[in-house]
Image: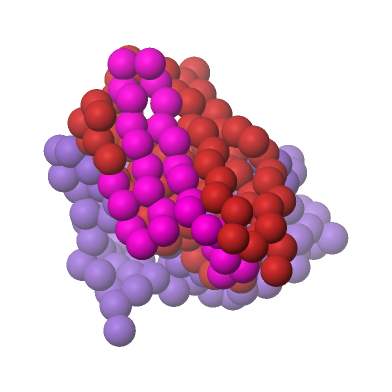
Chain colours: A red, B purple
Amino acid sequence: ILNVEQSPQSLHVQEGDSTNFTCSFPSSNFYALHWYRWETAKSPEALFVMTLNGDEKKKGRISATLNTKEGYSYLYIKGSQPEDSATYLCALKTSYDKVIFGPGTSLSVIP
Amino acid sequence: DGGITQSPKYLFRKEGQNVTLSCEQNLNHDAMYWYRQDPGQGLRLIYYSQIVNDFQKGDIAEGYSVSREKKESFPLTVTSAQKNPTAFYLCASSILTQSYNEQFFGPGTRLTVL
């Protein structure tokens, strides 16, 4: 059974701090990696889709990198704001129609 | 506005009863999915469907059933055979492409078995 792991499970940072967390996955069976942000009382929303080794994506203060050879992706948030508080999910696409989600990293940004 | 709707938002069920959760999308997506979330765990796939009148079991299909009679609709029935049905249920849809299939999620239904 393929497993996607995320660390840390939860994170508390002060407003203005930069932070990062990790998604680890088996490097075989790789099609794509997705990052989602899931705010409380809302639906998960896609942040990035990454398909190539070495990919780097950026959206505002949030960026992500991908290493398919060693099986990890990092998500970075620069200058965290309270509105960044959410659970961040990564999801590995392993085939045409199969996606496996990690357990998520819960981020709390303290004003 | 295009999107995915799920109803109801909260659902209470007596033990031994079947219950159906609704999921509708107007995004014209081919694929639809049902996930279950339990505390401290990732989203686990229950069933998915790529085309009308066809669906496949996910990792935890036992005790659940689905139908896909219309492209827009993918209802999930939680049967009395599901041993631990209390959970948060998310429906999603996506286009299907070779390289990626970003999923769009509904707001979820929280099911509690009394």
Q: Quick check: B14 above or below A13?
A: below
- Camera-side residue of B11 and A91: A91
- Camera-side residue of A18 and B35: A18
Residue B3: quarter of image: bottom left
Q: Position of residue B71 (x, y in %)?
A: 25, 63
Q: Quick check: B3 above or below B98?
A: below
Q: Position of residue B12 (x, y in %)?
A: 75, 68
Magenta span contains residue A62: yes
Residue drawn at (20%, 48%) of the image: B96
Q: Quick check: A35 above or below B58?
A: below
Q: In the drawing, does residue B63 fall left or right of residue A63?
A: right
Residue A2 can be seen in this image: yes
Q: In the drawing, does residue B8 fall left or right of residue B17?
A: left
Q: Which residues are magenta?
A: A57-85
Q: Position of residue A38 (x, y in %)?
A: 53, 59
- Camera-side residue of A16 and B102: A16
